[in-house]
Image: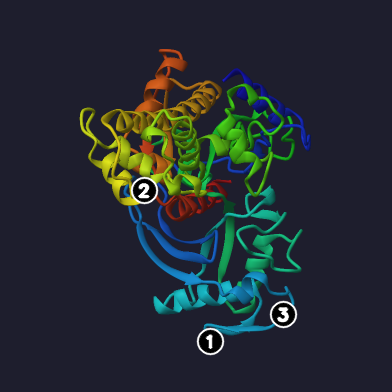
Amino acid sequence: MRIMNTEMIKGLTTPNDMSNDLKMINTYVTSLPLGNETGRYLALDLGGTNYRLLLVTFEAPKTPPLIEADVYTISKELQVGDGEAVIFCFNLTKTKLFQFIAGTVKSFLQTRNLQDLEIDLGFTFSFPVNQQGLNKGKLMRWTKGFDVKGTIGKDVVELLNSAMKTLGLKVTCRALVNDTVGALASCAFLDPETAIGLIVGTGTNAAYVEKLSNAKKITDLPPTVHSVVINTEWGAFGEHGCIDDFSTEFDKHIDVNSINPGKQIFEKMISGMYLGEVVRLILRKLATEGIIFDGAVPERLNVVDGFPTYFLSEVDRDPTHLFYSTEYILREAFQMTRFTTEDLKIVRYVCSSVANRAASFVAAGIACLLNRVDRPRTTIAVDGSLFKFHPTFARTMVEVITKLVPSRCTFRLKLSEDGSGKGAGALVAAARREALSE
């Protein structure tokens, strides 16, 4: 906690310092949903080959919104095409990537006979951007197989708005968000005590409400603003060695052999993309040293990602005195016929230990954020497959957080699903509410 808080303070006070593990990004979200927002809004969730368009309707205060959603696929040609190239896709129009997306927005609205409606849109864009306003962010780089030439350094909101305007749509993007901020906003609509958003799935990140007086590097917000949502990007925590003392030989092996050595160190110790691999490496070493399986090393333990993370959930789901899932995995997935009860106990212990360590690291980070938020009651909005599906992850988090925060600080973890949809819509609604009140 002490190390993370030190890095957070550095990230909040020293702009553009490349030595900071935590970038503590200004999201420009200064007003969360209050739960009294109404109206219809669009949400666009672009994070990979498939993207979603959603119509989010807030009908009554403190009532979950109605959601209508369609899913679209971006062709490989559009993912890697020239920004000036002309491509024909889905029989919609000959156009570039953002014009193609605009075409699907038009189709989405036409299907619902809403093509002439003036409507605001929230844009969940899961690629690195240099955010310069609530609805302004310049693309830093493409990831996940995308490489659309001519777009780096361009404002993605401007590209989208321009493309929609070209098609005669009366749609305006009002908010650019990531999934963590979306989870926070989605939960805040129904629970005003929400001040932290957390993703623990394939990757991990956290966002929280920070006092503006603590964020010395932020100088471009109005003097009337007292707090702002900060995107920590905490997956990068440890990139300069500050948590090396907590890193094992298995963590180091995973990092060195990853596609981004030296990067996302914290994420590699706690997220679903890596936990199964940590277990595989431990079990392989135990088998090689003759501690389990009578020294026999199952072939699958020599295969990268041969022990997927969902196996951890299956193993930990067994009752304490039974090993149904553990035995099934060894027999069916690893083709093993000879193992002892002691082997089963050790496999379970390894799975539990790796999951508990991850949950404890996440809990320490959340405890750090709770201390920064400094409220008597705080709701933490959480999304992600690891949190949702691992049988003990949430419980371990609660136990560890309780030990780390003052007794006067009460908290609860609340599942916040589809933040990229409902959350983006809720943020646009909140932005509209604020604009009308000025």
Indicate left or right for 62 with 144 as reference. left
First in residue order: circle 3 vs circle 2: 3
Which residue bears the numbered disc 1?
Answer: 91
First in residue order: circle 1 vs circle 2: 1
Kind of residue at disc 3: Ala
Say which residue appears at 69% left-offset and 30% top-offset: 12
Query: Disc 3 and disc 1: Cα gap in Å?
Result: 16 Å
**Residue 188 percent coordinates (x, y):** 43, 40
Q: What crowding class fits label 1: few (fewer than 14 Cα within 10 Å), some (14-19), or many (20 or more)?
A: few
Which residue bears the numbered disc 3?
Answer: 85
Asked if the residue at tag 2 contacts the one at tag 1, i.e. Cβ–Cβ closer than 8 Å, the answer is no
Label 3 element class? loop
Q: Quadrant of residue 230?
A: top right
Kind of residue at disc 1: Asn
In the image, 102 versus 259, the foreground residue is: 259
- Compared with 357, 117 (above or below) is below
Query: In front: mark 3 or mark 2?
Result: 2
Say which residue appears at 36% left-offset and 60% top-offset: 67
Indicate left or right for 114 with 122 as reference. left
Query: Disc 1 and disc 2: Cα gap in Å?
Result: 47 Å
First in residue order: circle 3 vs circle 1: 3
**Residue furthest top as drawn:** 407
Which residue bears the numbered disc 2?
Answer: 334
